[in-house]
Image (tube, rainbow, N blue to C red):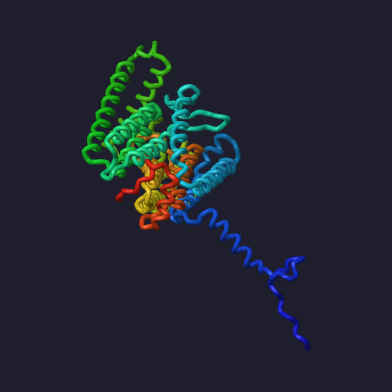
Amino acid sequence: MELQPAASSTRIIPGAADSQPETIAAEVPGTARRIRSYLFGHTDKHIWGIYLLLCLISIVELYSASSREVSGTGIGVYMPIMRHMAMLVVSFGIVVAMSRMHYSRFVTLVPLFVMLSIGLWLASWFIGEDFNGARRAIRIMGITLQPSEFMKLSAALTIGYLAALFQEKKGMKKNGVWIAAGTVVFFAGTLIFSGLTNTILLLCISLSMLVITGMRITDLLKIAMAYLAGMTLLVGVFYIDYKMHAVPGATADMSEMQMSKLTRWETWVSRLEEFGNDSVPKYQQKMTADNRQAMIGFMAQAHGGIKGVMPGNSRETSRLPLAFTDYIYSIIVEELGLVGGLAVLLLYLWLMARAAVLANRVSVNFAAQLVLAASLTIVFQALFHIGIVTGAMPVSGQPLPLISKGGTSILITSIAFGIMLSVSRHATRKGARKKEIEQEESMLPKEMSAANPTQL
């Protein structure tokens, strides 16, 4: 009996009799490798991992947290999550595109981004939508944008830009220090009417940038004292103005701007008074219209306990008005428990740690400053959100980066991740060959190509 040859797994290409047969198994891994290299090649895998994990958590938790929105608007069970996933697809595209862009292009793009942010802020004064007395958003071609989100990243990038521009061996040049300080004051002033929390958040990001840039302690103390004095004076003037107009009949002849300012001060004062009223435990306080969201948020976290009730089993999401944005961390803790809440917090801290490692390794100062500016913006935003939701800070509206619903927040967070990944892909490291470092420096303007002095 004649034996038949074993079946071959090869594929013969028609019309190519003399060519070597190709195996299908060899093609697929080759394609996968090319795709993987295109998307993730030579980038920081930790930063990519954090980004993808946050996106995954966002999809699961936002779907669970959108039940109130679905029931209140009748838009369909899957519509909120489909819109959010579409935003995440756009976000992924932005991150990939920016990661493949050489970071030297940000020398031009950062000033353009800052001008765009200022333009959006100015536009918000004329065509902005009012939320609780503050003009926080503008609508352009059906897209809602929040200038405050742009301004926070712009402030951090501007400080990093100036730190690279005015660098010297022992920190920043004297004129650079005061230009940077004036820049912070400008950005803080633009956000004061968009929310006190936004202003404080911006100051924290900016001051952290100034500390990391290696500023002299004496200069740093002078700037900190100037900020403190300026904030005290500003708050004092506004508080006196609030008291003068917060009497019966005093608002009759007030302009729209004055009424808006008065409304903001009423909001700030009530929130600070509520936060300072810690003599009564939260679980013994009465629920009112003013503290309803915060109280339900606390109930959600208490219900979650250590292990949580698992995704989709939230009890409070149907009662919490902003469960999908400003209070999504409450739903995370309710469904994933204290363990899940700490895991999310650690993801943001892990991002900061990886950014610090990357900033310390790159050879050019401008690259280090870009990484620090982007990471600090994301991490401080996350810490403020978590602090507000857990009661460690006064109530305010701050999204959780990449997890909360919101196009502007996702857009800005994506840009920040893209900047970090661009640096991780293209920047040379300390100890690289001299030729590689010189080639990188030649791609930057001479005044922006100084060596990285960052010590973390």
Q: Where in the figure is residue 145, as x and y percent of width and height? A: 50, 32
Residue at point 56%, 60% (across, down): 33
Task: Count all numbered tags in the image, as a single digit.
Answer: 0
- Foreground residue among 109 and 200: 109
Depicted 312 relative to depicted 198: above or below: below
Q: Nearer the viewer, residue 218 or 404?
A: 218
Q: Is residue 169 left or right of residue 349?
A: left
Side (left or right) of 95 relative to 374: right
Is residue 177 at all visible to an observer of this figure? yes
Quadrant for residue 165, please give it. top left
Question: Of all residues shown, which one is farthest toward the bottom?
Answer: 1
Residue lying at the far left in this picture: please name it: 218
| Residue 149 rendering spot, x and y as whole percentages | 44, 35
Q: Position of residue 224 (x, y in %)?
A: 25, 35
Report if residue 330 is visible in the image. Answer: no
Q: Nearer the viewer, residue 203 or 43?
A: 43
Q: Residue furthest right?
A: 1
Who's the residue at 34% across and 38% down the image? 206
Residue at image location 32% in from the left, 20% down from the top = 242
Name the image quarter holding the N terminus: bottom right
300 is higher (above) or lower (below) than 232: below
Q: Quadrant of residue 13?
A: bottom right
Judge whether 213 appears above or below 347 on screen: above
Q: Is residue 453 above or below residue 70?
A: below
In percent of the image, x 34 and y 48: which residue is there? 452
Give percent across and percent down for residue 365: 36, 46
